[in-house]
Image (spheres, rainbow, N blue to C red):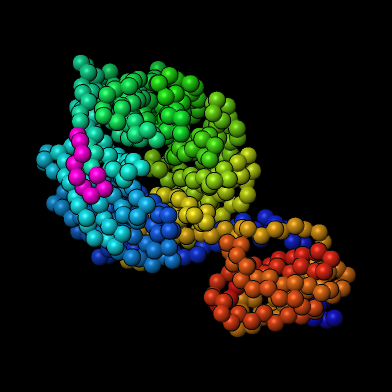
Amino acid sequence: MKKIIQSILFVLVMHSVFGQPVLQWKNNFDFQSGIDIPYKMKVAYNGDIYVTGISNVDTFDNDILTLKINSDGTTAWHNVIRNDYGEEPKGLILDDEGNCYVGGYLGNIFLDESSFILRYNNNGSQAWIDTQGYSLQDIDMDSNYNVYTLSGGLNIVIVKHSSTGELLYEFKNDTNYIGHTTNPILYLLDKDFNMYVGGNYSETSNNPQFFLKKFTPLGSVLFDIKYNPTSDKENVRFMKVDDDGNVFMAGWIGTFKGIVIAKFNSVGDLLWDNVIMDVSGLPYDLILDADQNPILCGKVYEVHETTEFIIKKYDQDGNEMWVDYPGKTSAYFDKIAHLASDASGNIYFAGSTWPVYLAEPAFLMVKYDQSGNKLWEYKADSILSGTGDNVTGLALDEDNSMIVSIRGPGVNGKNDVITHKYAQLTGIDASISTSTLLNISPNPFHSTATVSYSTAPLIYQESTITLFDLFGREVSTASFQNNYQLDRTGIPNGMYLLKVVTSDGINSTDKVIIY
């Protein structure tokens, strides 16, 4: 009885046990003790992760770094493009065979080979590379694994390659209107292989506005529209196309005076727009959820008179479904916050709060359900430690584990490409019916642990004990009464959930760590 009284009395609270992310692994990649910064990150069908960014070893010019990280967190391979000029990647895309395609520019716009598109095979070998004399801005891929590159300048230039590197076509669309200039920066394909190009259009050098062009697969112009919802400048930053060919565009107004989001239908008609006027307004990401509803995140100031993140979800008609302000941030122009959505419509957010609010944790992740209810919040101080550190990407794997790419502190005092994988404690029913006494000793444990369990008022019952991994998969199960010796033989190190259910249906759950 004395041992039972000394046990931990707790009321099982679902929020504190279920759904919280747990760091599965951390990968720090450093190339020759230089400054390494991730730009783009993608997750393959099997959970492998591909990252491209820049590496600066000699402090003069940037080189393009691409690496593959296995799903267990080990580095599979890395490649570096080294040139005499400052290179920068602009796009990263994967096919279903684990090959990755990287596009970018090579630093000298006066060269005939100023930009490139290449393919790395699954094993890291370079399959092919093609260089172009244009300023490459974006890339995309169709369902046949053909790769398209968008380049800008006086003309919109779209080049199509097969997955084996064969040049299939190249066409130019004149954008040098008399007295006008354009800057195409965004490129997308729809399911019918129609092509969308978005960017900024100016009648003078001081009044940019959105432009959007849609082309057939062979390059014929379907529509060409200009969009200017205010009398100020508008700069586009994001573009998405839904399954019906509707186009969503988001950008900022003036010198960060607000955020604008607009929806156009498949023939170019404006369906709705929404303007958030704010002295600090700037968008950081735009995604579509499983129901094709747009979710926008950015930063604002005027709502609570502090610079903070904003997340806003709209329905298909442009009505606000919910809005939240998950945390404070700084005046970053870089895209320091990112969104992702799973098949159930849950929304995931990751962002950097450094450096203004030093009292706030520098790293923040939040998960919302489709109605905007906050399911959990995760904060950490040690992940980001300097003014240049920030979150550069967020993605989900097939198990809805969160993959976060980070520009963060390296072992040599310089930035490394840092990648984290977080699993969620999901997949287990956590119904609550009573207060319980549950003791696991020791915990954490290495060999065996004693599990003692009773329901108030200290009554033992025939019970079933089940151990689950973090994905809700059953690891072991047994029946017991009073005490149970939990033996970890054959069970890998890690965090698990231990669930005890009595003969009358009362249950309780606690975390178990095996090392």
170, 272: nearer the viewer: 170
Location of residue 23 in the rendering, given as x and y in whole percent from the top left corner: 51, 63
Q: Position of residue 237 (x, y in %)?
A: 38, 34
Identify the residue shown where x is 60% and y is 32%. 321
- Whether residue 468 is visible: yes
The N terminus, quarter of image? bottom right
The quadrant of the picture occupied by the C terminus is bottom right
Indicate whether residue 226 is drawn in magenta: no
- Whether residue 296 is situated above or below residue 472 in the rendered picture: above
The residue closer to the viewer here, 190 or 471, is 190
- Is the residue 498 above or below the residue 395 in the image? below
Region rendered in magenta: 162-170
Viewer-proximal residue, 20 or 59? 20
What residue is rendered at 81% in x and 59% in y?
A: 433
Q: Is residue 108 left or right of residue 31?
A: left
Return the x and y of residue 193 as percentages of the image width and height.
34, 34
Whether residue 165 is in magenta: the answer is: yes
Q: Residue at x 61, y 62 (%)?
A: 472
Residue 345 location, quadrant: top right
Residue 411 is situated, as x and y percent measured from the top left of the image, at 35, 67
In this rendering, does residue 200 appear at all?
A: no
